[in-house]
């Protein structure tokens, strides 16, 4: 379960203070799928970064996996993320110098898993990429890169899986395929899935919908 209490986040840009999140409160039950929607600039990526422990809020509390991640140091957050968090980005964020297999095996190796290579191969096969193991990211299409990114995010079976507009750089048909794979993996691993999306249809298939506007959350 994730619990967000009186969350406030602001940044300084030039001389101005910009309030991005203003007294945000909500809870997410374990294993749920949650859609975060809102217009561009409404703070969706910022909220996701805070929930994933990538950033620290200005004030307020975020409890995830029974730990108060909002009061952790940078090192503590890094260790929390390694154990608990998978992240899928709009622009894939694969490591350019590594093959598909190496990209997926990396988080497994970092966690000390002795079967990193074979698990990574299994996940890539599940994503339909058994014949792309030694391809570098530049040799893969956008949809293929996102499938590698899905394999990389889910292969360590993190309890919390975040996806920030994972279909934003893909055509409609490829995007639908990615979403089907994302939900199949979510169901198989029983992760809590928190997804930012512009697509109303996709949002409506999630268990819970959070709409961000003017720094506030509206549940619908
Ligand atoms: N580090 C930062 N410094 C200054 N402004 C920022 C920073 N991060 C985000 N913003 C601003 O905060 C607002 C919310 O950004 P973001 O969370 O990326 O929105 P969304 O993902 O909904 O498009 C935007 O207006 C953006 O320009
Ligand atoms: Mg964003």
Image (spheres, rainbow, N blue to C red):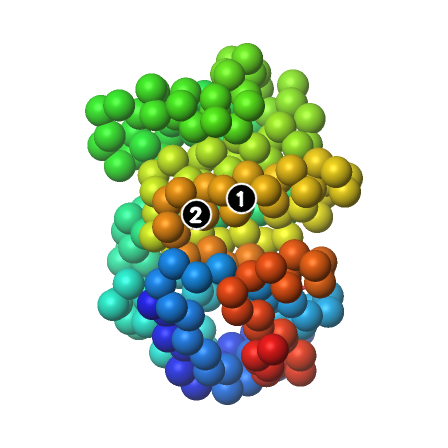
Give the residue at x 59% y 36%.
146
State the residue in front, 67 or 189: 189
Give the residue at x 48% y 22%.
125
- Where residue 130 appears, as percent x and y from the top left, is 51, 16
Residue 94's quadrant in the figure?
top right
Examine the rendering and report whether any part of residue 212 can be seen. yes
In the picture, which quadrant includes the C terminus?
Answer: bottom right
Element class at badge 1 = helix
Give the residue at x 70% y 48%.
168
**Mark 2 or 1, nearer chain start:** 1
Q: Which mark is residue 187?
A: 2
- Where residue 73 appears, as percent x and y from the top left, is 30, 63
Q: Say if 117 sits above or below 38 in the image.
A: above
Decide if residue 6 is on the left or right side of residue 30. Answer: right
- Where residue 74 appears, as percent x and y from the top left, is 33, 59
Q: Say if 189 sits above or below 76 in the image.
A: above
In the picture, which quadrant includes the N terminus?
Answer: bottom left
Q: Which mark is residue 19?
A: none
Q: Say if 130 sits above or below 200 in the image.
A: above
The residue carrying mark 1 is 182
Q: Say if 19 sits above or below 161 in the image.
A: below
């Amino acid at each position: 379960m994730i619990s967000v209490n009186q969350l406030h986040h602001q940044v300084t840009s030039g001389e101005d203070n910009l309030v991005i999140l203003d007294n945000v409160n909500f809870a997410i039950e374990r294993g749920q799928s949650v859609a975060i929607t809102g217009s561009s600039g409404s703070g969706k990526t910022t909220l996701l970064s805070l929930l994933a422990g990538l950033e620290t809020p200005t004030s307020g509390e975020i409890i995830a996996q029974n730990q108060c991640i909002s009061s952790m140091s940078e090192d503590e957050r890094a260790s929390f993320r390694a154990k608990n968090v998978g992240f899928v980005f709009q622009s894939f964020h694969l490591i350019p110098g590594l093959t598909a297999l190496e990209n997926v095996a990396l988080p497994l190796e970092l966690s000390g898993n002795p079967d990193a290579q074979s698990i990574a191969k299994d996940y890539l096969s599940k994503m339909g990429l058994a014949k792309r193991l030694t391809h570098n990211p530049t040799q893969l299409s956008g949809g293929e890169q996102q499938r590698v990114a899905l394999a990389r995010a889910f292969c360590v079976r993190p309890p919390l899986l975040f996806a920030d507009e994972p279909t934003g750089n893909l055509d409609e048909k490829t995007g639908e395929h990615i979403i089907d794979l994302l939900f199949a993996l979510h169901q198989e691993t029983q992760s809590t899935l928190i997804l930012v999306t512009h697509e109303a249809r996709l949002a409506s298939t999630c268990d819970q919908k959070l709409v961000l506007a003017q720094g506030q959350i509206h549940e619908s």
